[in-house]
Amino acid sequence: MEVRSPVATTDGREGKKARSVVAPEFLQREASATLAASASSIQELCRLITALESLGESLGVPDPRRTEWYGQLFDKLAPQVSGEALLVAAVCGGTNTGKSLITNALIGSQISCSVPEAARTRFPVASLPRGMADKINPSELFPEFVTVPWRSPQDGIDGYGDESLPAEAGSHLLIWREDPSGQQPTRLVLIDTPDIDGTLRENGHRARLVRNACDVIVAVLTQQKYNDAPVREFFTAAATAKKTVIVVFNMIDWPQQRQRIAGWLATFMAETGVKPAAVYAVPFSAEAAAAGRIVFHALPELNAHAKSSLVIEGDCPEGVADLAARLAGPDFDRIKLEAMKGALAVVLDPDQGAGAWLDAFESTAQQWQQARRVLGDRASVKVDLPSAPRELVWNEIWQWLEPKRSGFDLTVSKVYRVAGKGVMWVARQTGLTRSEAKSREDFSALELAALKQALTSFVERLQDTSRSNPRLATMLQGVLVEGDRTAWYADLERRHAALPIVSRDYRTFVRSELDHFSSNNPDTVRWIVTGLNVGAFARPAITVALGLAGAAAVPAAAATAGGLSTLVHHVGDVVVGTAATLAGEGALGLTVAGLKPLIETLFAGWSAERSRVLAETLHRVVLGDRLDEIDRLATAAARPEVAAARRLLFNIREFSR
Amino acid sequence: MTTNPPDEASGGGPSPEAAASLPTDFARFDELVESLEHWSRSADQWPPARRVCEQWVDVEPRLDRARRELSRVLVVGVIGGTGTGKSTLVNALAGCDVSSASDVARPTTIYPVVVVSQDLDLSFFPVDAMQARVVRSSSPAVANIVLIDCPDPDTQPESEGADRPLAIPHAHPSRPSDTNHNRDLLEAIVPACDVLLLVATAQKYRSWLVAREVAAFAPGRPLLFVQTHASRDPDIRGDWQKELESQGFMVPHIFRVDGLEAARRAVAGVTQEPEFQALVTAIDKELVGRAARRVRRTGAIDLAGWFLRESRGHIEPYAGAVRALVAGVETQQSRLEELVGRAIALRLRRSRFSWQHILTDEIVDGWQGGPFAMFLHTLKAIAAFWPRMRSAGGSLLSRVLAGQAVVPVTNTHGAWQAITELGLDESEVEQSRSILVGLAARARLSEPLVGRARLDGLAVQATVGTLLERSGAWLAAGIQRLVAERRGQIDGRIFRGFFELLFSGLLVAVLGRAGWNFFVGHLWLGRPVDGAGFLFEAFVWLVLWGFLLRWVVFARVRMGLDRDIRTLISQLPHAKLVDPLLADFAAAAEKAHDFIQRGERLERDWQSLARAVLEPDGGLGRLRREPL
């Protein structure tokens, strides 16, 4: 993967055009220039996290998209740290608590339908100040959503006429409208959100996405729904991210229940850690709700400590629109900065933030390293190939030697070759040795059996290894459980059948080895000739058998062969194939001794060539690209993005001190 | 729901037919429960079956109790989200303030309140275990039921690792709700309930937390649905019904009451509003007396059905893999059999020499009397001096052909060596086993249910030993039959007579000629005697003629031997020779397959029982299927 410089300022999220990194004015005005300075770092951090995300998914790191820090980083900091300064205020609460009603009241017109059935608002509906859509693309402000313009108050309920958008785009819609009245403050965005506790869990997810992006939350609570577990959870996260929360207790039996509110609020605050900037009560009134004219009661007894301009005295509906105006008023900078800093704190949290995710990323990558080591150590197999038919190898040597030999040698050689053939013919006719074709066939069958057995052992070893390592178990599940093993054996058989008894590769290998040997040992060339003279002389009577030709079938690296034990000289009659008496270094062994390593290499090469069939089956059919994948995951921790992200986090943290 | 005793539907007294049908129905139900018990514990080593078994451990006591306590009063648990007015409704039903209901703090009810009539024996009910407070009431609504005001399920924080949407940052190390265990308490109470009364409001009827808990409690427990806060909330019953139906419930009716108003009227002794009155009537009609038995029975049958559905959910993902394994075992068996067949056929055909011996012996032994028989016997006697070649080799086939016993295997290597002759070797067997290991893993069958691809020493000796014994026995029997058939072809008197005649013909001709020469030619016509020369010549001809006839006889016997060997080999699959090599896979697959099929059969049994026993549903809701 290409590695870009960590200071590059391009937006890493695909499909989004790069945005100029200019800190908004509210940040520049602020004495603390922390965020302004962090702006480019945040964009860069987003890019790095995005680059690592899919790798993290392959590694098995918990999905960061479900975490708070991810939401704050991508939905809040990245879109809002630069560009036009805006205050996003969202109305949130449980099902059927009257969110849409309160949003409409805050906006001053009906943007979202209010219906008796619960959990009907499925998509967030945002009201933008007039003229804003020309300056800011709503989809940049809400990067998780597909943003579409508003058509009617039904949009939040019905979606956007499902036919006009592709199905996947329709899943997270955000409907926006520019305020038609022009009353809405220019830097304020108001959003009606779906419920947070309904049976349609997608609604809750969308509400959380909106919550991540907003600076102010209008928490709509009722006497039934201020202490439910989902409600508490939702607002606890908001409090942690230092969102400004305005609490509205809806459907209050006014004024009978007024005294109760203090107790409810105390519970809510203790549970969630929310310190409301203002508390209001909205009385229950079906008629007022139907007319869309609801009354907000300020509760001075509860707002005493709020010390906020968001507290409005008096009980009139006009005060509500005023509340919206005040949000964008003198407290704008403070609210905005607090929300941004809160978001940053969530991202920087050592236990729950981005750093923790990087920790998990690295430790998981280390587990993969461990897994790779275990696999390398344990998943190997010895192939007990039958002894190579020696005449094949010797033939190759002979063919190489043919032009290099003296006339006398050739004559002697020819004489003995003819003699040898004669003896073999007799042996065959008498049934003492089998025909060459038959012996090749038998050899081939034995070899295939050995390869199959090695494949079985290898698979069993993989199985045992993956049982001891959960990472490998997940990776190899597809091979060991879902894999079509019949096809593996079929593939091995096919490859084996297709392999010529002496392949061109092997011939080249023999030639190059012999050339190499003779050029490296110019003095011993005489030895070779002598040795082969002896060999030629003795050929019909001497057979050289390989005691053990095992080649470790490590996939993709089968060219090197080891495990050779000894060359066995067998002096005896014409019986080919039974190394009954092992004479060791016999009388003739002395002369052949100089050639021993070379001949070992040649035989080993042949066996390696045969074993490569198995290696290919293992690599191509059984394991596929999983070894590469394991390799990729094992080296994930060393990716420069990880270090760069850590450096950025450190820098941002240092800055914000 | 086909049979429908009219009295039950109307909730009246028992009719003779219904009373008569009850015992048989219950016998059938008992039978079903016993089968379920036996079934769910029958294959507990197979992971999917183990999950079935684990579930059974939870379900079994409830089914058992439903059978034992058929006639006790029903326990009705009032459940619902916090603030929906459960306690208020309980107070209204009890006719007095038995449970504190308020809007001061959520949750209000922490410990359950059990409302029973004055004289009810509550010994069956685990009051202390669930930390409940018992209140006696004389209200007619609770005269014949036990009513429990349960804590809410939605104020306790989600425990770590549950399907909580997001992890909460550690902003608040200690919160008041950390001590909230309402849901745990609720989960301790609900098992004692026979019927659930689900209370919801416009704000709470679509709450996922409540829905999740209700879905967990609903199997086997009929339900009553009540929307409260009727005086101020809109009527959401239509939407709620849709929601409930999407969760798998059958919803015959939702009551819409105002708990506060009803409680007020109950205390004041004023006539209740019609909808509340309907609820009380429904409780009386659906939950009391004979109806209680029906409810309990319905609940028990529903629970058994739910258990079977859940079990299927555990097993079904692996049914295909188990079938594939069964098929795979067969494929591998026939693959190995083919190898065996090919090797045996080849060797049988190659060992003509041995065949000839057997056939010769058989034929000659059975052919007595007559000159040709004498000739054959003589030849056999002479041949006996000749050492038999190749007959007493170590190989299985030659031993079998020579009528010798199979040598038992003593070590692993020897075992593999011994079956090489049968066309099997280690690699082929391991290949089959490895393929089956993969198929078995897909069906979640692994060690120790099945073995490894590579057989260990003991297993090799055992399986190969069995294989050799079987093959030896099968071959011996097959060859014997074959020989017997062959002998049958020449066993006829006519066949023998014919050859005797042919042989005797020449003998007679020779003797006749000799007699003619002597008596007629020499004595009568006076020609010179031919001498022994003729007789010697005649003897040679006679022997040659005998050999020719013998050849014809044996040719007749050998004719079609190849075809017969093929026939013999084609019967190989019936012999199940290679089965021991794959026996563990076959057994495991068979067991899992059997488990699945028995499950399906039980589900069919349950369906027929449900059809026969369950009446059309009255006013009670039930969980009928899995959520959409």
Image (cartoon, rainbow, N blue to C red):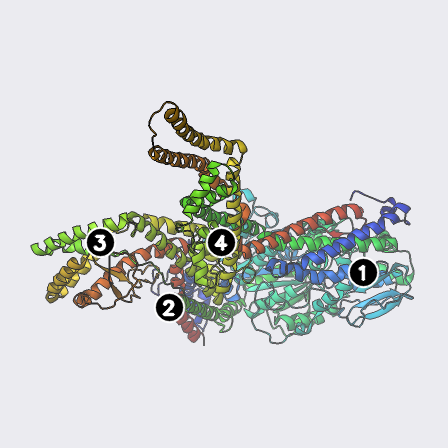
Helix, strand, or loop for circle 4? Answer: loop
> Which residue was labeled with disc 4?
B404
In the displayed structure, would residue A307 be above or below residue A492?
below
Per the rendering, the mark at residue A638 is 2
B599 above or below A335? above
Q: Amino acid at mark 3?
A: Arg
State yes or no: discs 1 and 4 in contact (Cβ < 8 Å). no
Q: Residues within 10 Å of mark 3 (few under 14, many from 20)?
A: some
**Could you say whether the residue bearing mark 1 is in a helix, strand or loop?**
strand
State the separation of the CA atoms marked 1 and 4: 80 Å
Badge 3 and badge 4 both on one subunit: no
- Label 1 and label 2 in one chain: no
Measured from the top left, where is residue A210 in percent x and y?
Answer: 55, 59
Tell me if label 1 and label 2 are in contact, CB under 8 Å.
Answer: no
Q: Residue at x 34, y 51 (%)?
A: A442
In front of the other: B376 or B124: B376
Whole-angstrom CA distance, mark 1 to mark 3, is 88 Å
- Return the x and y of residue B157 as percentages of the image width and height: 65, 68
